[in-house]
Image (tube, rainbow, N blue to C red):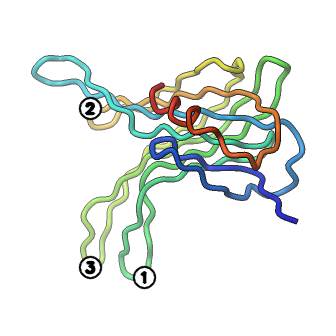
Amino acid sequence: MLRITGFLVLATNAIWQPFALGGDAAGSQYLLHVKLTQERSDDVCKNPTGKVLAAPILVTVEGREAVYLVGGKTTIGDQQVEHGTLLKVRIRSSDANTASVSGMIELSTVGKATDDLLTRMSTSMYFKRTVELGKTCRFELPKTDGNEQSLELSVERVAGPLAEPIPPHRAKAAVKR
């Protein structure tokens, strides 16, 4: 018996890839639209300029943790140091129109590796919020190096088997959000 309990969808490339969350696929299923943005103030014009850093779509089952990880690994000695963007989200139904969303996001970078030294800098934020289904909520991340970063989440309940891929037109729409 094949049991797929979640998907990681990279909307920027319109690709979906199954991943296992564990447990049975009982309970409500949710489509989670995520957008991580960064704005930097132009010192000359004092006008903010922004860009989308990531815009994945995650599909998960109520109560199971969905994980989005993009980045790299740098080797120092016999250790591999991961860096990049890590997002973990868990959704629980509140009522017919709302859901409780909790999780964490970590943004990390590494400096230049030498033979015996590597610096890893990270910013993490943990969150919990009750959201209205279909509405976007925004979390402001701590400001770093003149950059203002934010995380936007939108949750919708989906019907049907979890193993069905998201239609390409829906994945592409997430990139334009």
Q: Secondary structure at mark 3?
A: loop
Mark earlier in primary sequence (2, 1): 1
Placement of 47 over or under 122, stated as above or below: above
Q: Secondary structure at mark 2?
A: loop
Dots 2, 3 in contact, CB < 8 A: no
The residue lying toward the viewer, choosing from 141 and 45, is 45
Q: Which residue is farthest bottom?
A: 78
| Residue highlighted by disc 3 | 115
Q: Secondary structure at mark 1?
A: loop
The residue lying toward the viewer, choosing from 111 and 138, is 138
| Residue highlighted by disc 2 | 146
CA gap, disc 1 and disc 3: 11 Å
Q: Residues within 10 Å of mark 1 (few under 14, many from 20)?
A: few
Q: Amino acid at mark 2?
A: Gly
Q: Residue drawn 41% across and 51% down? A: 108
Determine whether, in the image, residue 47 is placed left or right of residue 162.
Answer: left
CA gap, disc 2 and disc 3: 31 Å
The residue lying toward the viewer, choosing from 49 and 172, is 172
Q: Amino acid at mark 3?
A: Asp
Mark earlier in primary sequence (1, 3): 1
Q: Quadrant of the N terminus?
A: bottom right
Q: Residue drawn 41% across and 61% down? A: 72
Residue 75 point in image, percent of width and height:
37, 74
| Residue highlighted by disc 1 | 78
Q: What number of labels is visible?
A: 3
Residue 42: name its quadrant. top left
Residue 173 point in image, percent of width and height:
52, 29
